[in-house]
Image: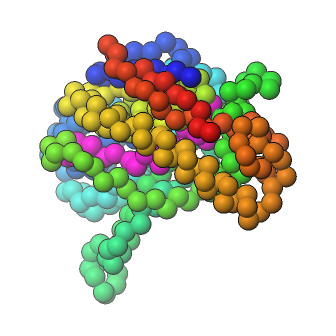
Amino acid sequence: METTHRVVTGDARELPLEDDSVELVVTSPPYPMIEMWDDIFAALDPTIGDALDDGDGDRAFELMHDVLDTVWAELERVLVPGGIACINVGDATRSLADGFRSYPNHAEITDRLTDRGLRALPDILWRKPTNSGAKFMGSGMVPPNAYPTLEHEHILVFRNGERRRLEPGADRRYQSAYFWEERNEWFSDLWELPGESQTLDDGLRNRSGAFPLTVPHRLISMFSVYDDTVLDPFLGTGTTTLAAMVDARNSVGVERDPDLVAALNDHVADVTDRSEQLARERLAAHREWAAENDPNYDAEHYDFEVNTKQERRVRLYAVEHVERTDDGYRVSHAPVE
């Protein structure tokens, strides 16, 4: 199996893609009203900087989402009918001249995408475990002026119209199956996963909010099949591209910052080992589960049983070789036995 991974230095508001050309979007945009991304938003619309200087949080919040809305219009255009968009975003808290308040980014994005005709599906609450004992902001031990801390983000899930239909009995669909016990974990609406420890210099770290590989890996496995194309219009350091390589899907990533695009090369260097390790961990975990649960059906490609008929043709692939191309990477994959 061979996949291609296109990496574009460009603007997500003008995606270099044909209509109806991607099956899945997995992305995490800059979060409105989080200070580390103020400069990015202000560069795209100077009136955002003016609103922040004036301490007008409501106005800045609205204008930042107007910028993102131009990207959502592009997602609607490039998603195939039935395609899925998964958007990881956190809410914000901030004190400006108009006082301290919460800015519900997840609600605003949901409203804007549904206004464009995409269908909101049940979302996922991603809780990031922390060792901090501080669970409040504000006045400490006395009421009434403290506030809960935000320890979670949202993974919003949308579908472009009706359910996607694949050809009956398609090998690529059934080979892309996940295990029964993986389904039970992945399709929970609460994920407890640590954030990503970024190996970047300070300048890049201040411009990137990378999620851990586990997040796009799960979403790609849940909502796409082999031969699909996964888009990340806010590529950052390229975690979605890496997950697409690991999961043997094609990908397109768009990123304005050329330094972040360049950083992807360092991460690609070990994708062969990471994909092999992840595939073998999944197989080993299923063998352990099967030994304890006595499932009913023989897998066609492995020496274990599976719990449902839909899992019988499951087949995992690992990266065998990565080749640089003029616009990204070409990756060959081999079945993991």
Residue nearest the viewer, comparing 157 with 317: 317
Task: List the single residue furthest toward the bottom.
Answer: 142
246 on left or right of 308: left
312 on left or right of 185: right
Quadrant the N terminus occupies: top right
Residue 194 falls in image quadrant: bottom left
Q: Count the marks: how many?
A: 0
Residue at 73% x, 61% y is 291
Residue nearest the viewer, comparing 260 with 44: 260
In this rendering, the answer to whether 89 lies above or below 29 is below
Residue nearest the viewer, comparing 47 with 151: 151
Task: List the single residue furthest toward the right.
Answer: 296
Residue 235 falls in image quadrant: top left
Q: Position of residue 312 (x, y in %)?
A: 77, 40
Q: Position of residue 232 (x, y in %)?
A: 42, 31
Quadrant the C terminus occupies: top right
Q: Is residue 294 magenta?
A: no
Q: Position of residue 125 (x, y in %)?
A: 52, 56
Q: Position of residue 104 (x, y in %)?
A: 41, 52
Residue at 31% x, 59% y is 93
Residue at 42% x, 41% y is 273
**Which region is colored magenta?**
205-225
The reply to whether residue 92 is visible in this rendering is: yes
The reply to whether residue 51 is visible in this rendering is: no
Q: What colouring style does the render use?
A: rainbow
Residue at 33% x, 78% y is 133
In this rendering, the answer to whether 238 lies above or below 35 is above
